[in-house]
Amino acid sequence: MTALNPTSQPSAGRRFLGRKPKSRLDPTRNNTVAGLLAWTAAFIFAIPVLWMVLTSFHSEVDAATNPPSIAAELTLDSYRDFFSGASGLNPWPPLINSATASITSTVLVLLLAIPAAYALSIRPVKKWTDVMFFFLSTKMLPVVAALLPLFLIARNLGALDNIWFLVLLYTSMNLPIAVWMMRSFLAEVPVEMLEAAQIDGAGLLLTLRKVVAPVAMPGIAATALICFIFSWNELLLARVLTGVVAGTAPVFLTSFVSSQGLFLAKVCTAAVIISLPVLLAGFAAQDKLVQGLSLGAVK
Amino acid sequence: MTSATVAPQHKSHRPSPPVRNAAARERRTAWARRAPLLPALIFLIVVTQLPFVATLVISFMDWNSLRPNDTGFAGFGNYVQVLTDPVLRQSIFTTILLTATVVFVSLALGLGLALLLDKKFIGRGIVRTMLIAPFLVVPVAAALIWKHALLNPSYGLVNGALTWIWSLFGSDNAPQPEILTQSPLLAVEASLIWQWTPFMMLILLAGLQSRPSDAVEAAEMDGASPWQVFRYLTLPHLRQYLELGGLLGTIYIVQNFDAVFTLTSGGLGTANLPYSVYQTFYIANEYGLASATGVITVIGSLIVATFALRTVFTLFKKEESR
């Protein structure tokens, strides 16, 4: 019980008791068994990812052996092929489309969500919880329920295969999550600080800049990263609403769905490159990831 | 909205009865408070709610885009067809089975991993990062890796590993199952469990770390066994987090399209409702039928969502009162 006995001067009475209960919460105690189990589990879960990365650096011949050639020579061939579009698939348009859709929609989401979150936390409207739950309930509506009308609207507006239509849809897809996350971050701004700023005669913009922004900035960054991930990953809407011009990276990946001879290294390379932005964004937002995924319900 | 809120300000130059003035000011502040909220609210209603209303209308229509002249009102015909057509009815069962299996197994695995990660050991940060990785692979990419790199019967890692293990014992006829064709639903489930376990783990770990440690310490002082601590302290505390993970997982997995589309293209009885909607509308051009299937998906989701919203609400109130 070191934690409860910081002076570390065991009283005489306790010494005579002879039995010192070991707490599992004792921060100084290492759990060897738990550690071993956790490391094993981590390796099992990471194997598909590690195998994907390793195979992307193998030649096509080494990638398709049974048993697997783990120690085969490493090569950058499939990366060179990927970027030069050797297999007739130019990866740049889909990558640029995905970047456009994800980044623009994330910016739009923040522009809409930050004021909304302000009106739900710092200067809340009446019945603000009802508004919050309306936002959340739209997220519960499956995308397939709106798929056909969206397709028909896009076709009638001539917006099929247009990346900006997708930007609008991704904005609406991420807006509820962003509002919930942003509200929980803005609610962390101490009321006393806001009152102090008001007493000192600071205007709205100055208060936002000097009081709200410093507290909310990490939250805004995490929200942006999570919205970016969701937009980058999206397939169903992109598959139905885009084609050759505005196809995104996940749509590009669907060209690998059916097997085509020796192509495993190519598949793995494409998967690695297209997953890389998400992996980087996810690890950067790691600490706030759970808050975003649980819509701000869990901190 | 700004112009509407500023306008009454200029009119009230003349001295007016103080009561009216106060009421006007109150209205003005109320609108000033609402103004930042409105763009987001209006945008969301237009983009998400209106298309759904359109789906509802189309679901009562007889509409195949290949036969535009036969378009008309169908009443509940499409719904009857969804519920009687063996393929579409099958997709309802597949959705339930797929969602239940994935949510239940990934919740159980996630709980185990969260309990391990709640302990202190060497390299805990690295283990956490490794465990999150599956969730951060683009879903289509993950499904492609499972399909080609892991489960391909001739060069996939699973069969490759079997060959290797058997050869260690001097045998050269290792079993080479064709999981993708023999048990396709299992393949879809496995890939989704792999991706969603980290999600469950993160939520449950957050729950474990919000657990008050003094109660556990007191119980241990009183000689409670680790199992008793888990059963009577940890589990009741985690209940809400288990519910939250389960319900949010259900909402996301009911909607899953990527894994089904990539791994099996909906073949061999793996088509779930989203895939069926896609198939009926995009390939078969049956707009009315696709909309009815979509509406049925929504009804199912709404049932789950009601419970989900209630759980989120309870947790939300708890966080607020902290």
Image (cartoon, coloured by chain):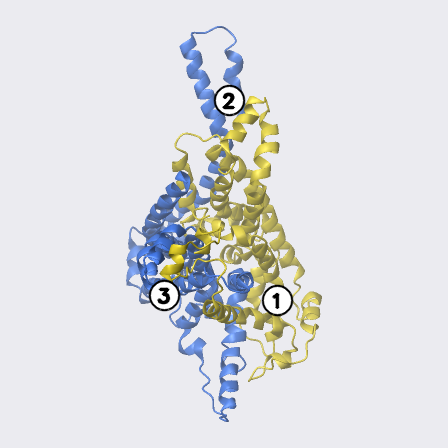
Chain colours: A yellow, B blue
- Amino acid marked by disc 1: Ala
Disc number placed over residue A270 in the picture, else none:
1
* Relative side of A246 to A156, left or right: right
Q: CA distance from mark 1 to mark 2?
A: 53 Å
* Camera-nearest label, 1 or 3: 3
Image quarter of residue A15: bottom left
Residues marked 1 and 2 touching at CB (< 8 Å): no
Viewer-side residue, B88 vs A57: A57
**Residue visible at 60% across and 24% down in the picture:** A202
The numbered mark, 2 or 3, whose residue comes first in the sequence reads 2
SS of the residue at dot 3?
A: helix
Image coords of residue B230 (percent x, y): 34, 60
**Residue visible at 51% across and 32% down in the picture:** B36
Image coords of residue B50 (percent x, y): 43, 42
Q: Chain of mark 3?
A: B
Instruction: Bin the neighbour count of mark 2 within 10 Å (Cα to Cα): few under 14, some 14-19, many 20 and up.
Output: some
Residue under numbered circle 3: B101
Work out whether A65 lies above or below A222. below
Disc number placed over residue B5 in the picture, else none:
2
